[in-house]
Every structure is written in structure tokens, then in C-alpha cells.
Amino acid sequence: MLPKKIKIDVRKFHFKGSSIVVGIPYLWLLVFFLCPCLILLKISFANSALQVPPYSAIFKWLDDNIAQLTFNVANYRLLFTDELYVRTFLTSTVIAAGSALACLLIGYPMAYAIVRSGRKTRMIMLMLVVLPFWTSFLMRVYAWVMLLAPTGVINNILLYLGVIDHPLKLMGNYCAVIIGIVYTYLPFMVLPVYSSLEKIDKSIIEAAQDLGCAPTKVFFSVVAPLSMRGVATGIFLVFMPAIGEYVMPEILGDPSTVTIGRIVWNEFFTNLSWPVASALSVIMIIFVAIPVTLWHSGRQSRLNKRAGQV
Amino acid sequence: MAAKSRHLNKIEPWHDPEERPYVYIENLTKDYDGSIAVDEVTLSVYRGELFSLLGRSGCGKSTLLRMLAGFEIPSSGRIYIDGIDMSGIPPHRRPVSMVFQSYALFPHMNVEQNVAFGLKQEKLPKSQINERVNDVLELVQMLDFKKRKPHQLSGGQRQRIALARSLVKRPKLLLLDEPLAALDKKLREKTQLELVNIQEEVGITFIMVSHDQEEAMTMASRIGIMADGRIIQVGTPTEIYEYPNSKYVSNFVGTINMFEGVVMEEEENYAVVRSSVLDEINIMVEHSTSAAIGAHVSIAIRPEKVVISKRPPKDRNYNCVKGIVQDIVYLGDVSIYHVELANGRIVYSTATNLFRIAERPIQWDDEVYLYWLPENSILLTA
Amino acid sequence: MKRSKFLLSMLAFGYAFMYVPLFCVIGFSFNGSKFVTTWSHFSFKWYHTLAQNRIMLDATLNSLKIACCTATVSVVLGALAAIAIVRFKRFSGKSFFIGMIAAPLIMPDVVTGLSLLLLFIGMNNLFGWPGEHGSMTVTIAHITLSLSYVTAIIQSRLAEIDSSIEEAALDLGATPTKVFFVITIPAISSAIISGWVLSFVLSFDDVVLASFVSGPQSTTLPMVVFSSIRMGLSPQINALTTIIIGVLTVCVAIAGYIIYHSSKRIPQKSKGEGKHWRSLV
């Protein structure tokens, strides 16, 4: 269990205004972010057991002075060997990558068109991109259920027009899940791409044209490379949340589209297997943290380089 | 050329050993994790002075100023203002006020609120605050802009408000961090004189940081030249310009011709130096610092003190070299002649354009004599 | 500038993709038929039903309460954290602090929810707190999540502000505490407002965290909507969506009006949205 007393180094807190400013949010994060993560890590090494809470202790006092620590790595082994979990990881990655790609294909031309429009219309167009983001996320998913359901709008229209005679199965596949994710995360692609495109000096494009470059070629040899940072940011912003998505596959997918988010939920609530759910979460944190750290350090070194040039 | 402050209680108090410095900085050092920004600086500034710290960016002048204001804590050394040790006194309790380079006007307050801010901290009665705000706004001629917000003012107007906001507190010491750097050239020149006039009127001691030597020369009663965290020379603008104590200072302030040489003879008030770059002739230099015979020294001479002529000087006292005019830079009021000596060395000479350009007596490729009086050149050992 | 047909059609497609589904939902909310997607006649029937749905109303009230608390607390904490990060040169564990602040941004909701639930269970066993899960635990979870967003927004605004205005205030004799309230807070007020709105929306919108940490007594609106959607289509959800979109449109119109009128006076203060987005990356 948790140590009974949390030791705080009092010397470091000077009990002045500044230590309160840092201290309050710091304490909050220690209690409500770091502690939960450590508990997660702890439980991931425990055994499932029929008791309350449903896992075995990994730390035991055998004697007054001797403590026993039992680390059980079976949960992790299970995750990497059992076909179900491996497939889940694959499914999640495919869905997230597909969503990021689809967002790019739709979002990039949109951002480019917005950048190329007049200064006044630009702001309105950008606002129209962001606006649906403020409506409830669930209701946006609901909107797609309405369109794609067997008795949904699309099927009804097609039936009415006589194109089909029985409803198509539009929901319950990867495609529907990807549509849902794209619909939700499109602004995350459009905005960074827009801001990187906006920064490109117009005279660079004119210079390329002046040097005899055809418009399509200008795009691929000048505009596209210069907007790569925005594209990378956009892909990152779509891919990262999509990988842990729970709601979308739950509603738009069917039981076979099992993603990591869903399996954590099921292991915890349905199978009551806390250790497995915890181990899955730990792996997911690592899975997400590595690219973020790389990204951040890359960005930091770029910033340093830029600072060095000045 | 210099509109120096005449407000000093005595003329040149720094020459009076009895006079107590108003601001005394003693062995001040600032060390940022091993990189030393300010290195053992000792400096005295007297009451009513407009002292200018002059140096290239990164020489430590801003750090020194920020230590005076209390934003940076010195690694070692002390600061005394009016005899009081400032160590441990936080910025908001110091009798010091600062005009920031960015002016740092509060964007959400109008001009009046900005200026009144400092007085409100002193909890003065409202009527008194109003009176003093009005007085100071009148002084900087901004009374009509009371209700404007900072973003509705021009750069010069913001500068005045920043100054007014500091002056209204009647600080013992006013610090100005590149106060005119954000203004364009014309406005800067006009504001320089205004600032000096205001300083004379209020009689507050100013310490100003600048990287613009012309600005420092125009405004300051004395200048401290800084490089690499150290103060290299302190003196009036005339002293700094005419008697630089080192190659660095002579190069930094204005342009100068510099020749390396060896001391051949040394008399009580002049030396004879032989310089290989000046055709191995002997140069007479008047000097105050002594240099031993055989020592390697530099002779410096300002271009405007070098006379250019087609005929050699009649007076044998002049130092004289011969060369060919290579280039003439026409600046309107003066022209700068680039004269190449036989050994390829270029010597600059500035001459007032007494004649219209077409009638100029000296033209490209003319053979000319350059000559100057021994007392106009400077002997530099450092 | 020359406009390419390809770009324009992609733009049209993009907007259609974003808005057609929402308009469908709005349109069918006025459908009199009990089959959601089969149009019979215009009616406000489902709005009446919604108004009498006690579960939905209670959940809405509960969600509003939680969202308000979340927004307020996370703005306070976020402002403190942002000041610590931007203005304090160093304190022990600063980079660790920055990492912890940003982490919930990228952690999947499921993981955050699960870990917090485990924490609450563990704490309850140790100290007997927080007892039964409810609005309190949901609020704590939402604050932890939205703290990241709020801090990022305020941090980027704070970094833009010339820190010499704070120094100038100190220099003019204001105490550090006074500088904070009179200079710093007004200067970041726009970021504080957007942070408040954003965390309100995040909280009002969240279903995953709430599902993990809420108790039987405290159901939030998204939880009710989620379970209803799982069951299938429901015309009441159409009506609810329409109402929310209506409220949102009014809010956006008011905000737009205010921004438009203040931007007339202040020339170069706009694009806050874009900048905030950049700061989240």
C-alpha cells in the first residue's frame, strides 16, 4: 500500500508567495496525476484474485524487518503473446493511421484554400472550421450514427431512390470508425497546416514562378516542403488521441473492431481484471510518451538551433 | 557639440576629492553560472549627473543597470545610493526608478493611470496625485493625451509617458535603458536634447545605458565605456574622444588612424616613435603616460586632425607623410580622403568641404601630403 | 489571387463533411414521426418530451455544476502553474512539473480515468476519503484533464507579455502581490477567459472520465447521452443537439460581436485562437 507518511522537504518551501504559486498546482499534480500513475504501475505487477479489490498485494511484511516484494510480469507477457491483444494493438494503429491520413487528405487542401482566400474571409472560414469542435463530441458521433445506421438517412435515401433494395451495412467497420475520428479531429489538422502555410512568404512563391516553375510544381517543390512542420504537427495531433479512442469504436464500430481503449474498458469493467487493464494502460502510456518525448526534444533542439543562429 | 548638463552643483565634482559620490558602486560582480556579465566594477556617480554607460550589446551594461534597480542580485560587491547600502532591498523599496527600453507601459491603463500608478503605491491623497500627474505631464508636454491608451500613442509619445511615469515618483536616481533606441533617427536627435533639458529642470541624477556613441556624447556629463563586463574608461565626452586610454576606446568612439611603432626617444613631454607602416619616419608624439625606449606602442590620430594638402607643411614641427588619394567619400559637409602610402597602408583624413565639389582642389590619384601636430596624436600602450 | 477549382471543391467538400451531418440532426429534431429518420410532419413533440425527461434534466444540471466548478478551479490552478513555468527561472523539479502538466493532454482518456478511479479507491481504503464517488470525484478528474489545456493557453499568453511591465510596476513601488493582481492578471485576462470556456466545454463534453469515476448518484449529461446512443437512435437526442447548437451559436455570435467591436479599437489584437492552438502542440 501507499507509504503512510509522505515526506516533504520543508527547506525547499520558503513559505513565501512564490512557493504557494508553484506549490498548489504541484501538489495537485502529485496527488491526482503522479499517484494514479504509480498505482497503475503497481497493480500492473499484481495477480488477479477473487477478493476486494480484485488483485493480490505485491508488498507484504513477512516479519517485522523483512518485507517481500513480488513482481508478476505475467500480465505483460500475456499482452505480447496473446493473439487478441496483439491484434488489438494492430487495429488501433491502423485506425489511428488511417484517420491521420484521411484528415491530411481532407484538411490540407482546405487549409491551402483558406490561406489563398482574402484576408477577411479567412477569419470566417477558420472560425467555421473550429465551430463544430465546440459542439458536443458525442452529438457529432450521433450525427454519423444517424447517417450510417441501417435505418439511417443514407440507407433511406438509397432505398427510396431504388439504388438498393435492402439496407447496406455502413456502420460497424473500420471505415465508419475512421469517418467518426476524422469528423471529430479535422480542426486539429486544418489549424496547424493553416498556420504553417500562412507563414510562407508570398514572395517565395512568386520567386519560384518568376524562375519558371509551373503552378503544380511550385506547390510540390516549394509550398509542400515548407508546410511539412504543420503537417507533422497535424498528424501528431490526430494520431495520438485516436490511438486511445474509446467512444468512437464503441458506437460506430462493432464487437470486432476492438481497440486499446475499448479493451482497457472491457478488462476493467467486464472481466474485472484490474492487473491486465493496468498493464495495458502502462503500455499505452509508454506507447504515447515515447513519440511525444522525441517530438518535444526535437522541437527543443530546433529552437536552440534557431536561438544559436540569431 | 555636447549639450552637457550644467546642473551639477559644482563644475566637475569628480575632480574634487572632498565631494562624496551620490551613487557608489563597489567591486560589483554578476556571475551567471560561470559566465561573468559584470566583473568587479567600481564606479562613482555624482549628484545631478547624467552618466552614460556606453558599450556594445552584451558588454554587461544592462545587467549593471538592472542591479541598480534591484532586478538582479549581485554575486558580490555593493551599491550605495546617497550613502545607503542597497543590498537586500527589493526593487519596490528602492529610491530608484527605471525607464525601460520597451517603455513597459501598462497596456490596460490609460496615460493618466500609468503615470499615477507609482504615486498610488505611496498611498498619497488623490488631490496630490492629480496635481503631480498634471505637473509631470505638462513637463513632458503630454497633458492633452491623458485619456489615451498606450497603443494609441506614437513611439516618441510612449517614451515621454514612460519618462513621466518614472519622474513623477521623484526618485533619487533615474535609470534609462536605451531610452531612445526605439525611435527613428530624426526623432531621436530631438528627444536627446529634450531629455537633457528635462534632466536639468528636475535635477535628478540619471544613469543611462546606450550603445550609440553619438547619443552618449550629446547627452552625458560623463561616459563610462564598458567591455566584457568591465569599465575601461570613465571621463567626460571630450576626454573620451580626445584622450582615449586604450586602443579599444579609441576605436569604439569615432574613427581613428592607428599605427604601430617602437619608441626611439623619450623626453619629458614627447616621445619619438618609429613606425614601419609610416615609411620608417620618426613621429613625434606628445604624451602623458611614459613609455620606455624600445617599447611597442600605438599612435592614434583622429582623421579630422590630419591635414591634407598638395604641398608639404612649412613648419618642421608637423609629422608628415606622403601618399596618393585613392578614394574620396563625399558626405556633404565633409569629405573623407582615403590616402594610400607607399607601403600600401591607408590613412584617413577628414576635411571640411570649403568649396563646391567641382572646384575641389584635391582629386583622385593626386599626390598629397598628410600632416599633423605632435600634440594632436595619442600614444597608446594598451 | 487565382483560385483553383480543385481547391474550391475540396473546401466545399470539407465544409459539407463538417456541417451536413449536423444539419441532418437539426432537421430531424422537428420530425413528428417516432422513427427518427423517416420524415412525417413538422412538430415540436420531441422538445416537449425532452423537457419532461427528468433524468436528462437532472444530468444536465449536474453537468453544468461540474463544468462550472472545473472551469473555475482549473483556471486558478492553471494561472498559477503558467506563472510558475514562465516567470520563475528555476525551482526544484521544474522540468518534471512541466512534464506532469502536459501529460494528460496526450494520455488517452481511458487511462486517465482508470488511474484516477484506482487512486480514489486506494485513498478511500487509506483515509476514508472521498467516500462515495459522485460530482466531487468527476470534478477532480475533469480539473486534472483541463489543467493541461488551461496552462498551455495562459502560458503562451504570458510568454508574449513583455515581462518588463511587471518589473516596471515593482520599480514604481508596487509589492509583488499587488503586481500580480493589478498588472499580471489583467494582462492575461483574455487567456483566462478562453481557458475558462475551454475547460467548461471539455468538462461538459466528457464521457469517458466521468464513466470511470462517477458514482450512481451522479450521472452527467454525456453519460446519459452515451447510453442512449448505444441503444440506438433517439429523437430526443436530436432535440438536445439542436438546443446545444442553438445556445452555442448565440454565444459565438455574442463573442464575435464583442471581438469585432473591440478589434476596431485595438488594431493588432486577434488570432488568439490560432495562437492558442499552436501553444497546445
Image (cartoon, coloured by chain):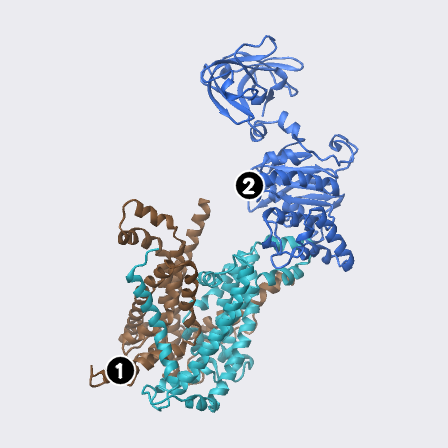
Chain of the residue under the numbered disc 2 shown in the image: B
Find residue A127 and report its image quarter.
bottom left
Colour of chain B, in one word, is blue
How far across and down, in percent of the image, does residue A93 sit?
31, 69
Residue B58 numbered mark, or none: 2
Q: Residue at x 71, y 42 (%)?
A: B198
Disc 1 to disc 2, C-alpha distance: 72 Å
Camera-side residue: C31 or A300?
C31
- Disc 2 secondary structure class: loop
Q: Chain A drawn in what color? A: brown
Q: Quadrant of residue A224?
A: bottom left
Q: Give the colour of chain C.
A: cyan
Residue A29 position in % (x across, y down): 52, 68
Above or below: residue B230 compared with residue C186: above
Q: Position of residue B360 (x, y in %)?
A: 51, 18
Secondary structure found at label 1: helix
Pinpoint residue A134: horizontal percent, then vertical percent. Answer: 44, 73
Front residue of B9 and C80:
B9
**Image height check: is C176 above or below B55?**
below
Give the side of residue A239 with respect to residue B349, left or right: left
Instruction: In this rendered view, identify the residue nearer to me: B3 or C140.
Output: B3
Is residue C162 in view from this perspective? Answer: yes
Locate residue C177: give its quadrant. bottom right
Q: Residues within 10 Å of mark 2 (few under 14, many from 20)?
A: few
Determine if residue A62 is in view: no
Identify the amino acid type marked 1. Ile
Which residue: 36% across, 58% down? A116
> Which residue in the protein does label 1 denote?
A157
Same chain for mark 1 and mark 2? The answer is no
